[in-house]
Amino acid sequence: MKIICIGRNYVLHAQELNNPIPEIPVWFMKPETAIITKDRPFFYPEFSQDIHFETELVFRISKVGKYIEERFADTYYDAIGIGFDLTARDLQQEFKVKGLPWEPAKAFDGSAPISDFIPIEEFSDIQNITFSMKKNGVVMQTGKSSEMLFNIHRIISYVSQFVTLKIGDLIFTGTPAGVGSIEVGDKLEAFIGERLMLTTEIK
């Protein structure tokens, strides 16, 4: 199982980090060891002084596919959840300046807390899903799937040109504006609509 993450998929988020707006999906991967499930806590690592939250809708792949045409992409996922793409922003900035890969800043253990999944049949409109995130009870991020630069069908079609998608793979679809730092003692909550999906305490 692999985790595919889309970067800079919301215009305002790209702008808040002073990144250019991409013309094609920007993607990277996290290992399975990044996953935290069942609302388990995240333990702040020693290698960073500036971990940021990024709240994202997550799509679960339901069948094997390669070179998937965009018009058929809707048959390749079966459920949607929500997750945090936790990022060591200080390391990421250092690596960007040096032109180095981002993996140490993005793929570390525990960097992908994730909720349970809602079957796709429960959504009336995949392209208009609202989601939000609270830190210590205060709303920090809100977004809609309609605001994505590249929707899930485009993402699936594009990424499958390079890597075969397999059952159980997860696609993090990017974060809206409002990302920020976390500290020990913080409590993060992620919602799809009004439904609390994920709680992560920082220890």
Image (cartoon, helix red, strand yellow):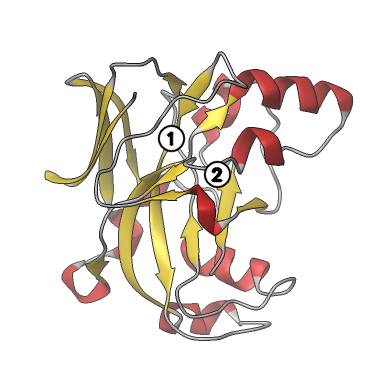
In which quadrant of the rendered view does residue 113 lie?
top left
Q: Is mark 1 on a helix, strand or loop?
A: loop
The residue shown at (34%, 39%) is: 143
Is the residue 150 above or below the residue 117 in the image? above
The answer to which image quadrant residue 7 occupies is top right
Q: 181 or 185: nearer the eye?
A: 185
- Residue 172, percent from left and from top: 48, 53
Q: Name the residue under label 2.
A: 9
Residue drawn at (44%, 34%), measured in percent from left and top?
Answer: 54
x, y percent for residue 27: 66, 52
- Cα distance, mark 1 to mark 2? 8 Å
Quadrant of residue 96 in the image?
top right
Residue nearest the viewer, comparing 40 with 191 = 40
Task: Specify the farthest residue to the right.
Answer: 98
> Can you tell which mark lies on residue 130?
none
Q: What element carries label 2?
A: loop
In the shown orientation, is residue 174 left or right of residue 30?
left
Q: How crowded is mark 2: few (under 14 residues within 10 Å), some or many (20 or more)?
A: many
Amino acid of disc 2: Asn
Q: Is residue 73 above or below residue 188?
A: below
* Dot 1 amino acid type: Pro
Give the residue displayed 61% in from the left and 82% down from the top. 68
Residue 176 location (% of width, % of height): 43, 35
Which badge, 1 or 2, comes first in the chain's sequence?
A: 2
**Image quarter of the C terminus:** top left
| Total labels drawn | 2
